[in-house]
Image: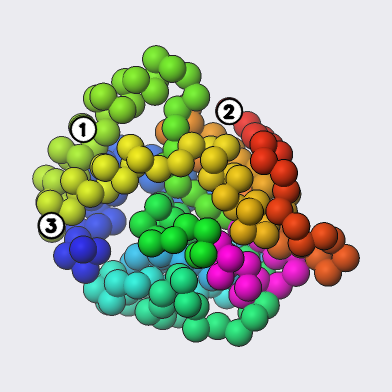
């Protein structure tokens, strides 16, 4: 499916989000805090538009995606790119300082398995940063978002995309995706610690952040309900 939307994917995202995607990338980069000399793996990277943002401060960032067409459309960015399955990453244990996923986690076949695999390739103390659609926290806004905004976004995406039918699936996946706390609990159950999240756009988008335990830390998942909201 993503091969079919690759040609106009970045443009469609900008149209659908009214340009807010640029702000969300910058906020995600701030949460990631990638530093010069670090190695960062960007999963479901698409054409590498987010990867490029993370590399600005000197980190060595790899764009990984299952879609060959997405990667081909991003070749001009001059970034290291690799075709990879997020459930079976072609990297050794503890290869990266951080792993990121932006608006791609909900497309993985097994969310928890992907998070466990991400944990494997990150060094102890390393970071996980996820930017994904979520659930508005204020009931009236949540109603408008589900009944009106998502339909409008789908309509815009179908007119801006090279494969309009694919955006029906994307809208449906947004409606059925986990809310902030549920995703935080899945992240914790995969072995990550210090799970927290930041709400953007009243919670329609959320950035989750977590760390891989250090060797002296207990690897057991945090208890349900422990993820902390860091902003609203």
Q: Classify mark 3: residues with Cα within 10 Å, few (<14), some (14-19) or many (20+).
A: some
**Which SS class for mark 3?**
loop
From mark 3 to mark 2, how far is it between C-alphas?
35 Å
| Residue under the image location 21 percent in, 63 percent down | 1
Q: Position of residue 215 (x, y in %)?
A: 83, 69
From mark 2 to mark 1, how far is it between C-alphas?
24 Å
Q: Position of residue 38 (x, y in %)?
A: 66, 72
Whether 116 is among the magenta residues is: yes
Q: Position of residue 200 (x, y in %)?
A: 50, 34
Q: Which residue is mark 3?
A: 163
Q: Classify mark 2: residues with Cα within 10 Å, few (<14), some (14-19) or many (20+).
A: few
Determine which of the numbered discs, if any, sits on residue 232 in the image. Answer: 2
Q: Give the residues drawn in magenta, as a range.
A: 115-128
151 lies left or right of 43: left
**Mark whose residue sits in front, 2 or 1:** 1
Q: Is residue 108 visible?
A: yes
**Which SS class for mark 1?**
helix
From mark 3 to mark 1, how far is it between C-alphas?
17 Å
| Residue under the image location 12 percent in, 51 percent down | 164
Circles 2, 1 touching at the beta carbon (< 8 Å): no
Q: Residue furthest top?
A: 140
Determine which of the numbered discs, if any, sits on residue 151 in the image. Answer: 1
Whether 161 is among the magenta residues is: no
Q: Earlier in the sequence, mark 3 or mark 1?
A: 1
> Which quadrant of the figure contains the C terminus?
top right
Which one is nearer the viewer's eye here, 213 or 154? 213
Image quadrant of residue 120?
Answer: bottom right
| Residue under the image location 28 percent in, 56 percent down | 10
Q: Earlier in the sequence, mark 3 or mark 2?
A: 3
User: Where 201 sits versus 32, above or below?
Assistant: above
């Amino acid at each position: 499916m993503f091969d079919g939307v690759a040609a106009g994917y970045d443009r469609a995202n900008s149209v659908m989000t009214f340009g807010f995607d640029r702000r969300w990338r910058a906020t995600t980069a701030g949460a990631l805090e990638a530093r010069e000399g670090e190695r960062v793996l960007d999963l479901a990277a698409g054409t590498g538009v987010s990867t490029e943002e993370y590399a600005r401060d000197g980190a060595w960032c790899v764009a990984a995606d299952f879609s060959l067409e997405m990667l081909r459309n991003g070749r001009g960015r001059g970034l290291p790119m690799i075709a990879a399955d997020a459930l079976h990453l072609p990297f050794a244990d503890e290869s990266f300082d951080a792993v990121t996923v932006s608006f791609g986690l909900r497309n993985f076949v097994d969310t928890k398995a992907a998070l466990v695999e991400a944990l494997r390739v990150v060094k102890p103390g390393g970071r996980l940063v996820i930017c994904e659609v979520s659930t508005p926290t204020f009931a009236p806004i949540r109603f408008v978002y589900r009944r009106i905004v998502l339909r409008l976004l789908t309509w815009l995406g179908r007119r801006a995309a090279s494969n309009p039918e694919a955006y029906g699936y994307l809208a449906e996946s947004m409606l059925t995706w986990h809310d902030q706390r549920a995703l935080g609990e899945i992240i914790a159950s995969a072995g990550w610690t210090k799970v927290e999240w930041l709400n953007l756009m009243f919670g329609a988008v959320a950035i989750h952040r977590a760390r891989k335990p250090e060797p002296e830390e207990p690897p057991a998942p945090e208890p349900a309900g422990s993820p902390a909201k860091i902003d609203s």
